[in-house]
Amino acid sequence: MPSSFATPNHDPIMTQFDRLVAFACYVLLFLGVFTFGVSSVVALALALAHGRDSHPIIRSHYRHQVRIFWLGAFCIAGALLAGLAGSGTWLIALFNAVEKATGMTDQALGVGAGAKQAWFGGVMLVASVTLVLFGAGWTLLQSLFGFLRLAGNRAIGHTPAE
C-alpha cells in the first residue's frame, strides 16, 4: 500500500477499494466523450456515493470528478441552446428569403433582415460547435490529469491534514 494512504483513521482495504473506484471514474469520464455522456453519469453517481467517507486524497479526486462532469454538462447544455437558436434563426432567414419579404430592410446598413438573421444563426452555430469542442477537450484533459495525479498518489488541490 502506498505510504501516503497509511493513516490510522481509514481502513486500508476500503482506501484501496476507493482508489480503484476513483480510477474507474476517471476512465468512465474519459469514455463519456465518446458515449454521449452515458458513462459520465455512472462516474458521477460513483463519485457522489463514495466521496463522503473516503481518504482525503481520494476525496479530492471525487470532488474533481464531480466538477469535470458538471462543467462538461454545462458546456453541452449551452451548445444545445446555441445550436437550437442558430438553426432556428437560419430557418427563419431561409423562409424570409423564399417568401422574398424584402420590405423589412435596415436603411442605415443596407442589409436585409434575413441577412442579419443568417449572420446571427451562423454565430450561434459556431458558438455551439466551440462549446462542444471545449467541453469534450476539457473533459478528456481533466480526466487524464486526474488519473495521472491519482496514479502518483497526489491530491487534486489542497487537502487539509487530518
Image (tube, rainbow, N blue to C red):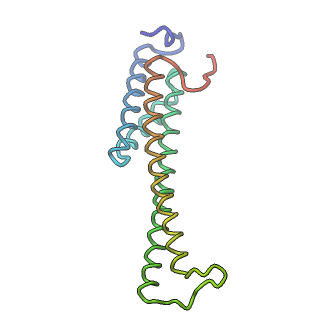
Q: Is residue 156 above or below residue 69?
A: above
Which residue is most to the front?
110
Toward the right, the furthest residue is: 108
Residue at horizontal 57 percent and vertical 88 percent from the top: 104
| Quarter of the C terminus within the rendering | top right
Q: Where does residue 110 sit, x and y in percent of width and height?
A: 60, 81
What is the x, y in percent for residue 29?
A: 40, 38
Residue at the image position 42 percent from the left and 9 percent from the top: 1
Vertical arrangement, residue 141 with respect to residue 147, above or below? below
Q: Between 109 and 69, which is closer to the camera in this rendering?
A: 109
How far across and how far down the image is residue 59, in percent?
A: 52, 26
Q: Quadrant of residue 105?
A: bottom right
Residue at the image position 45 percent from the left and 48 percent from the top: 133
- Expressed as whole percent of the image width and height from the top left, the position of residue 88 reads 46, 72
Residue drawn 48% across and 8% down?
3
* Callout count: 0
Q: Is 119 placed left or right of 136 in the picture?
A: right
Residue 82 or residue 12, whichever sits in front: 82
**Residue 144 is drawn in which quadrant?**
top left
Q: Is residue 87 above or below residue 154?
A: below
Identify whether 73 is placed above or below 152.
below
